[in-house]
Structures are given as structure tokens and as C-alpha cells.
Image (spheres, rainbow, N blue to C red):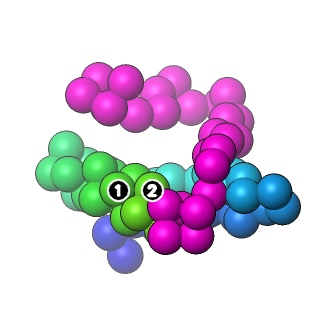
């Protein structure tokens, strides 16, 4: 597995990004960006108006600096 993204579609055209993960060996190669773009594309296709981010503060980073 290279990585995964979990998005939950809620009521009222809202989605919640629950998790995104890329294996350490694959980081820095654009896989996280591709996962996020695919998630945003799917939200647009479903006419989602808001995407909330579920953040579990135990990581010392969430996105690479180029994503911030």
C-alpha cells in the first residue's frame, strides 16, 4: 500500500476528511497531493459545499510545507 485517504460524506452537502496517510518511503513524491485532489474532485462531483478536516493532534505535521 502506498497510502490512503478517508472522507466521510455527511448531510447538507458537507464532507469530513477523517484521515490521509502516505507510507514513509513514498512521501515527497506527490502521492498525498494526488489523494487530496481526488478527494476534492469527488466532493465537487457530489456538489459538496464544505469539507471539514478532522485533526488528531498527535502528529507533528499534517501536510508538507508545499500543502500548507
Front residue of 50/8: it is 50
Q: Is residue 52 left or right of residue 39?
A: right
Q: Answer whether residue 5 is visible to the viewer in this image.
A: no
Magenta stretch encompasses residue 17: no
What's the CA distance linking mark 2 and mark 1?
A: 5 Å
Q: Residues within 10 Å of mark 2 (few under 14, many from 20)?
A: some
Where is residue 51 shown, x and y percent of the image? 62, 46
Number of numbered discs: 2
Disc 2 to disc 1: CB gap under 8 Å: yes
Q: Is residue 4 left or right of residue 46?
A: left
Q: Answer whether residue 4 is visible to the viewer in this image.
A: yes
Q: Is residue 50 left or right of residue 11?
A: left
Where is residue 7 shown, x and y percent of the image? 62, 62
Magenta stretch encompasses residue 63: yes
Residue drawn 15% across and 51% down?
29
Residue drawn 37% across and 76% down?
1
Does dot 1 land on a helix, a strand or a loop?
Answer: helix
The outermost residue toward the left is 29
Question: Badge 2 is on which residue?
Answer: 40
Displayed quadrant of residue 46: bottom right
Front residue of 61/68: it is 68
Where is residue 17 shown, x and y percent of the image? 62, 51
Question: Badge 1 is on which residue?
Answer: 37
Residue drawn 29% across and 50% down?
33
The outermost residue toward the right is 11
- Give, as a single range, the part of the protein colored magenta: 43-68
Amino acid at each position: 500500500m502506498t497510502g490512503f485517504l478517508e472522507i466521510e460524506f455527511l448531510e447538507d452537502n458537507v464532507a469530513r476528511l477523517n484521515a490521509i496517510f502516505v507510507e514513509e518511503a513514498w512521501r515527497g513524491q506527490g502521492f498525498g497531493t494526488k489523494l487530496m485532489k481526488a478527494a476534492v474532485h469527488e466532493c465537487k462531483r457530489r456538489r459538496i459545499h464544505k469539507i471539514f478536516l478532522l485533526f488528531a493532534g498527535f502528529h507533528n505535521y499534517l501536510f508538507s510545507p508545499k500543502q500548507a
